[in-house]
Amino acid sequence: MGKLIPSVCIDAVLENLSDSDAIRAVGEVGIPAFEFWGWWDRDLEEISRCKRDAKLDLSACCTHFISLVDSPKRGDYLEGLRRSIDAAKRLDCKTLISQVGDAMPNQSRGSQRVSLVDGLRAAAPLLEEADVTLVIEPLNELVNHPGYYLIRSDEAFEIIEEVCSSHVKVVFDIYHQQVSEGNVIRNLTNQIEKIGHFHAAGNPGRNELTRGELSYRQIFDAIQETDYEGYVGLEYWPVDDPLNGLKEIGRWF
């Protein structure tokens, strides 16, 4: 049996609060971890202090948003990754989330995939030395991210297999993959060893997990029945009171 741990994306669920107030609120509702997107425009010392005071873990944050499918930008991507690894170590964070960039219409999809794989292979030694895991994120293009390169989880898993590093995996966003492909329980459980992080939101609307067509209690039970031990980031925009919603989800765990 695995262990699925909830984590609150404060940039989504608690976007109207300051970082310090959001971190404090996560601790008060009894959820043990939080995450956010970019670290570079934040006060890392203040976050460290708040994290320590609230006795919370930082489950994940993002690396710089530089395209991996555009090979001339690889040096910039790797330099951004080095800085992100340093920030992650300062915050005792073991997972960095990476988007891969928009598709380039003037280049073949195959050449962009080669660039993506080669970039991740170049990143792997940096990650392995620091013992930090990078998770690449497939997104949906139908609703939220038109033009994005990586849409489906099956292609993301193939890329991870090509890279062949235990420190490069996939963040499986259940909301995005429900929009892109459906069949989420079978797709995620069949490739669970390639998943390093989860995200969750209701569909349609990207609101609370209790809204919409996804049965999250069953999805989470299916994950728990695998060997996965890690976080699911609650990355949604609440319709109702956010703290009451977090308390309700927290009781599931």
Image: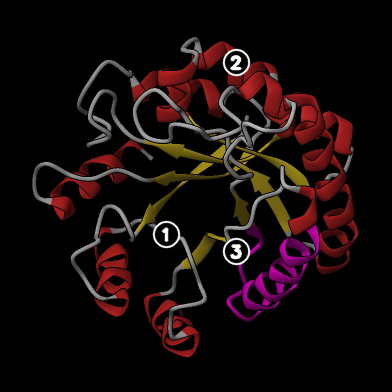
Task: Find the magenta span and give its range.
Answer: 74-95
Whether residue 150 is in magenta: the answer is no
Q: Which residue does the numbered mark 1 point to in the structure image?
A: 32
Q: Which residue does the numbered mark 2 point to in the structure image?
A: 187
Q: Is residue 199 left or right of residue 86?
A: left
Q: Amino acid at mark 2?
A: Asn
Residue 77 - label: none
x, y percent for residue 107 = 72, 32
Q: Is residue 210 above or below residue 239?
A: above
**SS at badge 3:** loop
Question: Which comes sooner in the sequence, label 1 or label 2?
Answer: 1
Q: Is residue 42 above or below residue 247?
A: below
Q: Which residue does the numbered mark 3 point to in the structure image?
A: 64
Query: Could you say which is closer to the camera, residue 38 or residue 5?
Result: 38
Q: Residue at x 63, y 29 (%)?
A: 1
x, y percent for residue 45 = 48, 89
